[in-house]
Each structure stands twice: as C-alpha cells, then as structure tokens.
Image (tube, rainbow, N blue to C red):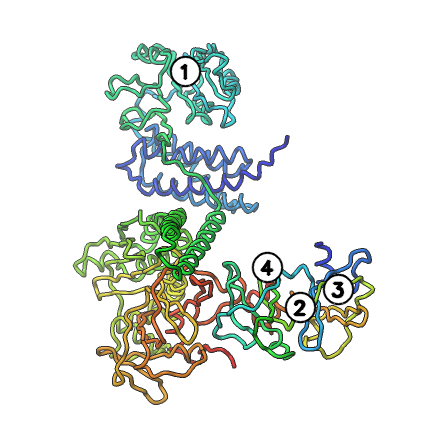
Amino acid sequence: MAIDITRFHQTFFEESYEGLDAMEAALLRLTPASADAEAINGIFRAAHSIKGGAATFGFKAVADFTHLLETLLDEMRSGERETTPVEIDVLLRSVDVLRNLLNAARDGQNADAAVVGRLADELASVLHGGSTSPAAASAPPASAPASEGWRIRFEPKAQLFASGNDPVRILRELASLGPTTVRCDTAALPDLTDLNPEACYLAWDIELRGSCPRDAVMEVFAWVEDECHLMVAPLAPVAPAQPAAATATAPVPTPPPAPAPAAEPPKVVPLAAPAREAAAGDTRERRSEPPRGEGGSIRIATEKIDSLVNLVGELVITQAMLQQLASGLDPVQHEKLFAGLSQLDRNTRSLQEAVMSTRMLPVDFVFSRFPRMVRDLAAKLGKQVRLVTSGEQTEIDKSVIERIADPLTHLVRNAIDHGIEKPEQRVAAGKDATGTMRLSASHQGGHIVVEVADDGRGLDRGRILAKAAERGLPVAESMSDAEVWQLIFAPGFSTAAEVTDVSGRGVGMDVVKKNIEALNGAVDIASEAGKGMRVTIRLPLTLAILDGMSVAVADEIFILPLSSVVESLQPRPEQVKRIAQEGTVVRVRNEYLPLIDLREWFVLPGPKMAAHQSIVVIVEAEGKKVALQIDDLVGQQQVVIKSLETNYRRVRGISGATILGDGRVALIVDIGAVVRLLAHPANGVGIAA
Amino acid sequence: MSTASSEISDSGTHAAASSPNEFLTFTLGDEEYGVDILKVQEIRGYDTVTRIPDAPDFIKGVINLRGTIVPVVDMRLKFKLGRAEYNEFTVMIILNVAHRVVGMVVDGVSDVLQLTPEQIRPAPEFGSGVNSKFITGIGALDNRMLILVDIEKLMTSADMALMDSSSQSLQ
C-alpha cells in the first residue's frame, strides 16, 4: 500500500516553524553566562527534530543546513566550544536562513542559494577555525570514542510499536557499527492470555564492541529516545565503570537517578529521567522532554473550532428565543418548564464560554517575536534597548492575535526608531543609556489592553502641528494634546526628518489605527516630551461576541457596542442648540457634542422628534464624542456578531448584524465609522430614495 | 444534475437532447420567468425584514434565515413590474448563487417545468423588464412563453448592488 507522504508535510512544517520559534526564543535568552547544557540542549533538540523530519520528507537543503547547525550546537553543549556572542549571532542568522529554506520547501521553490551558501560557509568556518575553548582543547577528549565499545541497555516502552518504530531495525543498525552481542530480556513478558500483541514487552542488553563514537550509538536511538529507557555505558574499564555496569545490568533501570550527583554513575545516560538539575560537569547527557502528563494537547483545524463557535452562537439565539416565548406563560402553571429553561440558560452560557476559550491563546504568541526584533533593530540603529514584557499569559482570541501582530510590530519599530534616543543623547538628557521598551497585556473588564511604551523622547507637539498644517490638515494651536496625538494617525503622516529603511515613510500609524478599529478596538496615545510615549490598544476579547446596548429607532432595533457608549441622557430643551449650517449640538456639562438623529441618519420612517423628547446616547470613538438621538433604550445584551458580507456587502456605518431573541435581525452600529463620516459628511449614508 | 446547471450558465440552447433542464417559473407583472431549479434553495413567505441603510430601494433589507443573514431583493421594484405589495401571499424565492444566499421577492411562483432543448429558443432582442444580457433564452411550452434568466449572472451583477465591487470582480 502506497502511503502518500505529502499529507504529513503540513504537520512537518507546522512543527518545524514551532521548533524554529522555540530555537529563536532560547537563543535570545542565551548569553555566554547562561549557556548551560540544558539551554543548549533545548536548541539542539529543536534543530535535531527539524533535521530528522526534513530528511524523512526529502527536503535535502533543509536537512543539510540543519546538520551543520546541529554540529555546532553539539560542540557547544558538549563544552568543547565556548558559547560566545559570535556563535549566538551566527545561530540566530541560521534560524532565519532555515526559515527561508522551510518556506521555500513548503512552496516548492528554491531558496536563495547564495544566502544559504554564505551562511553555511560561515557556519563551517566557525566550526573549523572556531573558538574552541581552551578547556576542551586541553581536556582529554571526554567525547573521544571509547576504544573498547559500549554496553547498551535498551528497554522500550510498551507503546513503541504505535509510533512505527521497529527494534529490529535499531538492532540491525547497531550491528552495522561493530560486532554486537545481544541478549533479549523477556522478564516482562506476560502470559499469552494477557498479552497485548500491539505492546512491546521485550528489552535488550547489547554489547557493542568497536571504536565507534558515542554519538553514533545515540544517533541510532534518535527516533525512539522519548519512548524507551536507554543506558549507554562504556565497556572500557575506566575508573568508575563498576557502578555503571551495575546499573546497566540492573533489570529495571527506571527509577530516577539518585538525587546525590555523586551516586550517579558518570556517562550513564538515563534518557527518560525526570527533570533534575543539570550537573554542570557532565554535559554529555541527553534528556527527553519532561513527561507530558495530563496537560496534553491536540491540533485542531481552526475551521472546526470556528464552526463549533458558530453552532454555539446559534444555540444561544435559540435559547434566547425560547426564553422570550416562555415569558408569555404563567410561571405558576409552567414551573417545570421555567426551571428547565433556566438550566438551559446556564448550560448554554457555560458551553459558550468553554467553546470560546478553545480559541484563546496567550498573547505571548505575538510578544515572543519582539525580543528578536528589538535586538536586531537596536543593533542596526546603534541604540541600546531593553525590552520588558509583562502579562504574556493574558489570553485573547486567536483571530485577534493574528491581526494585532502587524500593528504591534509597527508600534515597536516606530518606538525604537523615533522614540528611543541614541545612547549619548540619552546620557546627555540625564537618562539611562539603555532605553526601555515595555510591552504589556492585561484584562480590563471585557477587554484586553495591550500597551507599548518607551522612555524615549516622546512626541513633538510643535513638529506634529507644523507637519499637519503643511499637509493641509485642519489644525489649531488650541487643540488638546490628545487631539494633536490623533493627528499622527492621518494617512501618510510622518514627522521623521529622514526616511530610514526602518520607518519614516509615513505608512504605519494610519494602518495601525485601521487594523485595530477593524477589530472593534481603540488606540490611545499618551506622551510627554523627554519622558516617552505610551500607546494603549483596547481590544475586545473575541470577535464573535459583542457586549451591546440595544436601542430602538423607529421600528428597528440597533446595537451600539457597549465599549463605545459613554452615557445616555434625556437632554433639556436648553441643552440642545442648532448651529446654522452646521447641524445641532447638545451641551453635556461643558462639552458641545454634535447630535446625530439616527432616524435621519439611517433614513427611517416616522416623524422627527425633538431631542428633548427622546433619548440621547453619548458615544466615543477615535477620541471624539458624538451624541446619538434614539427613541428608546431597550436593553443591554451580549450579541453574536454575524457578518453582513457573507451574503451581502459592506454597509457604511454598520459593522455587522446580529439576531435578536425574537429571530429578527438587528444591525450593529459602527461608531468609529459614524464619527469618521461626520467629519466628512460628503460620504454620508442614507437609504437611497 | 450538475451538467444541467452548467449548461444553463453557458447557453441553454445547446443543451444535450437527453437531459432536459428544469426550471422554476415565477411571475412578475404579466411576464413569466424561469430560473434554473438548481439555484433555488427554498420558497418561503415574506418575513419582516430589517432595513439596511445605504441600499437602493429594491433591496428590502435582511432576514434571519436559520441563523444566516440573507439580503432580500424585491424584483418587482427592481424591474418596475407588478405592484410591490406585501401581504400573506407575498412569496420569496431563496436562491443559492455564487456561494451566497439571496432572497428574491416575486409576484407569484407557478410551477416547475421541464424543457427539452428544442423547446428553448434563443433570446430575441426584445424589451422585457430584465436586461437582455441576463436572458439565456425563451422557453416555449404550449401557449406559455417563459423568459429564462441566468439568475446567477443577474444577482452578481453590479446593478443589483448586492456585492462589494471587489468581490464582483472575483466572480
């Protein structure tokens, strides 16, 4: 039976990208001081599995390159080579090359061979000419092949066969390394009646004679190292061989090594050992991942989760519909029905929460890309930047995460390029030469708040105003700071004196704002000259559900996103003023806010009512407040957002639709768009006559 | 069945003799129209619609069709045929065109007819309510004359204003 191997490609690529991310993160944490065996081992493992996968699937370029990488890493973790910034740097760049190679392999294209070749040469030169540490050079080669051979205890776990591994293959490969004596240990074999034909009960004691290096032996077991207890001890009667041999021949070497390092036989490698402190001296050991335990996870296609979310959305609507129908019944006569309905209500809510939580990911998924970016950018611009992140574990909807990555990248890039000064300028200003970038995420009510803050020079009010005037934007000296900061969101706005290849081309802030607002979020800027600036992004937890205020206008119901509602009031006649040509304003405390009659705005039937006879809801978006005149407040509810665009098209001033408890459709008002349309009335909405 | 649907969208006149096309017929004013039955999802009464701002008058609004938001077009207003009255007899044909669901209000639904290729004549240049570029042919059956409409082409066309211009270009 032919197996179409290409169907595993997707998984291979996903895992490889994850492995690369993990490698990158670990490399960034790695400093010459912190370079312990465990850290390097983590990186090595990631590289190793990419290499294995690539070789299996025939991505030769990837496998070859990873092999070089692996060799370097191997020397580092064995202590033969000191970890210096040179190695870290070349490894980081290798990660990039590897990512390109993987992209190329995935898209079936050829990667830029020149770049790959150059880095491969560089790797090779580091490897050969390399900065071999004096310690390793002088030490009698701990890794040198043991001349006598190896004593191997190979005890697979019962589920070995499930992963498609065959002990016979392993034994055969071992035999190819040198003459072997194999003894099979059948002690664990149960009676025939209890025997599970799919489980592995056997263990092997192998004596391998010959002068093969230890790595060659380990290589044979590379695919099964997570699925077996493995001990490899030299046959050579070196000093402590006694305990080693004892352990190796012990029937069950499962118990974790004794906590006292002295009791641990050197050079014995307990592969499945539980986590323990890395013994500083013995860098030879390999450890598998800590046992997976209960916190297992599975990969699920996003579409499956999305359809689950949709179905639950339907269920919530149906439940609301039942509730509404039942409200007409006599509660005394239908007591049981009511009890059942309230239970349904509770269960639906919990189900909804549970399903929504499956889409939630920690915000770390975005934050983790920044250490690298900040490091590279700072180096490029000759600045010193320290990145501090907090709240990485804050969870947020996957689709939101995907869509804030770009805006955040822009913000961080801007902050480093324009915000944070060069070290000498910082020192002159009496600040620490190293600038600080803060990225933080937190939950606030039904929102997630992401902050990007720096302690750089802050925004230059005068320069922004001048630039805005130059570009013909309506500006005045009397504008509040908040209004001035909003100007930088205008398309094409840049105050950068010169265009660098990092930023300053004037694309960016408007895109940031647009992206965030498309998510029903809001961007705010706080800045103080010389002290730095802070951009605060408020986002809804999920895109599928919205906390809304339902309001009645004519015979229609509209939903206002609760996040943008400031207050509602019934104005007194003297609060409402008509300004000739400009429309109507309503005075709320000391602010004059433009008043929009939603009935006129959406061209709905019915007589026009005076503002003081109806209700006014004050809403805020993009730093501007607007008063909306409506007929009545209906209630406050969570609504499931439905797209109008699935079967229809985008409608200006409307962000989507939802289905009310009675089955009717209600439109969700896009406050941001209303505010924008108010500023440019030429694009006004209205039902065409 | 799938061949039938592709034939109607290329040209109804060259359908294979063995596979007759089935059409759902409906009336608009005095004219009788036919659409490919495979594009029809269901027929239902006229519900309350939620009006949409910024839409032409023939787009009545949107309805909730078992959880999906579906726009409703009144063909009588669009083609200025018949009188646009809404009562318990008003019917709506729910169409499935270009992976979208659209409701279409008509004067009345008559029946489902099978037409053999010989019964389908090429569309003459004549003035019906519907622009002739959307007409694939004329079905002649006894004394009746059916105007066969490429409903998918019609519903995705720019003058129906049902789609964003960007998605139209993809169609």
| Foreground tag (1 vs 4) | 4
Question: Could you tell me residue A462's position as x and y percent?
Answer: 26, 74
| Foreground tag (2 vs 4) | 2
Instruction: Write down the chain letter for disc 2.
Output: B
Q: Is residue B171 above or below residue A351?
A: below
Question: Could you tell me residue A217's position as x and y percent?
Answer: 44, 20
Q: Residues within 10 Å of mark 2 (few under 14, many from 20)?
A: many
Q: Which residue is mark 2?
A: B109
Tell me the CA gap for discs 1 and 2.
81 Å
Between A360 and A221, the residue placed more toward the observer is A360
Among the 4 quarters of the image, the one containing residue B151: bottom right
Q: Are marks 1 and 2 on the same chain?
A: no
Tell me the CA gap for discs 3 and 4.
21 Å
Mark 2: secondary structure: strand
Q: In the image, which disc is placed on residue A153? A: 1
Q: Amino acid at mark 3?
A: Ser
Q: Residues within 10 Å of mark 1 (few under 14, many from 20)?
A: many
Quick one: label 2 or label 4, which is nearer the N terminus? Answer: 4
Q: Which residue is mark 3?
A: B11
Residue at image position (53%, 66%) is A648
